[in-house]
Image (cartoon, grey):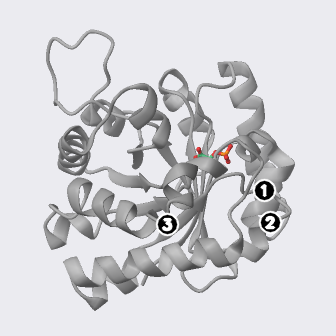
Amino acid sequence: MRKNIVAGNWKMNTTLQDGQALISEIVNMVQDEATGSAVEVVVCPPFPFLSAIGRQLPQGGRFHLGAQNCHQKETGAFTGEVSAKMLQSVGAEYVILGHSERRQYFGEDDELLSQKLKAALAAGLKPIFCVGESLETREADETFNFISKQLKDGLFHLSNEEFDQVVIAYEPIWAIGTGKTATSQQAQEVHAFIREQIARAYDAEAALNTSILYGGSANAQNARELFSQPDVDGGLIGGASLKSRDFTEIIKSF
Ligand code: PGA
């Protein structure tokens, strides 16, 4: 069965010291406050802090370590890049791929993302694969066509076994970092659509078993309403994951 997941995407924020203070607060609050045990928490700090933050996470519990990106090749002369295998070797279990900021600012297209997905899976990482439309696309009433194409071109080339490892995040670009959250109805509508596409590309069981997270200005105030939707299995949280109280409240929203 699919899992409820709250993932914190720290993006390019914090120093090592700030990050360590933040994660120790989060771990303490989550442990103290009897949050529903059925929620998996994935923390995705910047590359240089992965080992250190990973060591602060209680082992064998609900906390898991994730990275924000990886290179598509396993090793080699790619100065400045980080491979999936390296991430796995420092304790990462997840990797965010296809985030709209990577697509937009770093020109990552479906072809490249397909290769990154393969590399992540080969290294034993679970990809959190992001899709989501721009405001322009939404206003042109093209959201479903757009999402369907992102899924087809970027993701649905995976085998059934590979796809089993994937978490999907629906992140409307117009909601990311803008304070403008999708309504729970808007989120539910797209999540249900994504699940339907999975059923078509794979089968009903795969559709039922895939966790689909919502991302885009999710916060302590709106998380409960968003997570109450039948096809919303959690959140990919940016800004609010940098505040221990807010992030803990979001985890407690289940
Ligand atoms: P936000 O970012 O919560 O700050 O809108 C979400 C994301 O980009 O993953």
The quarter of the rendered structure image containing the C terminus is bottom right
User: Is residue 143 visible to the viewer in this orientation of the structure?
Assistant: yes
Quick one: SS at disc 3?
loop
Q: Is residue 51 left or right of residue 181?
A: left
Residue 11 position, x and y percent, is 58, 32
Name the residue tied to disc 3. 141
Q: Which residue is mark 2?
A: 222
**Mark 1 or mark 3, which is nearer to you?**
3
Spatial separation of the CA atoms under disc 2 and disc 1: 6 Å
- The answer to whether mark 1 and mark 3 are in CB contact below 8 A is no
Which residue ends up furthest to the front in the rendered image?
140
**Amino acid type, label 2:** Asn
| Residue 254 appearing in the image | no
* Residue drawn at 20 percent across, 77 percent down: 201
Lateral position of residue 191 relative to residue 167, left or right: right
Residue 163, how many percent across, how many down?
24, 67
Above or below, 192 relative to 140: below
- 7 relative to 92, above or below: below
Q: Earlier in the sequence, mark 1 or mark 3?
A: 3
Of residue 165 and residue 150, the one placed in the foreground of this image is: 150
